[in-house]
Amino acid sequence: MDRRTTRLLASILLVVAIILIGIKNFQTKSEAAATPPKKGYIEVKKTTYTDLEQEVEHWKQKYEDLKKKKATPPERPTGKKMHLNINDGMTSKEVSKQMEKAEIIKDANEFNDYLSAKKWQQSIQIGDYELTSEMGMQEIAETITGNLPDKQ
């Protein structure tokens, strides 16, 4: 073999080696893309991942808003308030009428009948009382008479 043939053979071998290395690298990259992810993982596109991140931020914000809303108790509409001044000689009917007029109780006769049934009409105490429409008949009666609640 002469020199030219040897050079030609070496050049061909070099070109074939470069082609084989290129093919091997190309296959490795395409195989890596085709191999499934590790167990428990999934592959997603970058745009899908970005969308998911934005959705997570949206739900975090909603959660924080709800937490703040729950932390601040809702404003309850307060009932009517009344300053009741019971003077000497006032009857239970007069007291009941004042409370009905101030919308603390719905029916003065019903409240007066309640006091009568409990035999508390004569027990009404002279004094100043703060009453609200949220109080029940029993609580109002106990307040203005000074009687303790019945134990059942």
Image: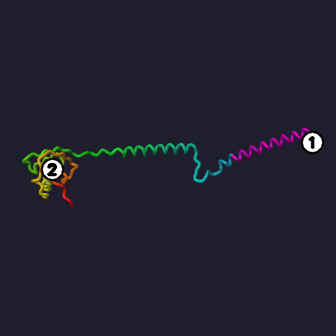
- Which residues lie in the magenta part? 1-28
Residue 55 magenta = no
Q: Find residue 47 and name its label.
A: none
Q: Which amino acid does label 2 sit on?
A: Ile
Residue at mark 2 to residue at mark 1: CA–CA distance: 130 Å
Mark 1, other Cα within 10 Å: few <14 / some 14–19 / many ≥20? few
Quadrant in the picture for residue 20: top right
Outermost residue toward the left in this view:
89
Q: Residue 1 carries which label?
A: 1
Residue kind at label 1, given as amino acid type:
Met
Toward which corner of the image does residue 115 lie, by quadrant?
A: bottom left
Q: Where is residue 80 in the image (x, y as percent from the top left)?
A: 21, 45
Which residue position is annotated with label 2? 144
At 16% from the left and 46% from the top, the residue drawn is 129
- Residue name at image x 27 percent, y 45 percent: 77
Total marks in image:
2
Q: Is residue 140 left or right of residue 39?
A: left
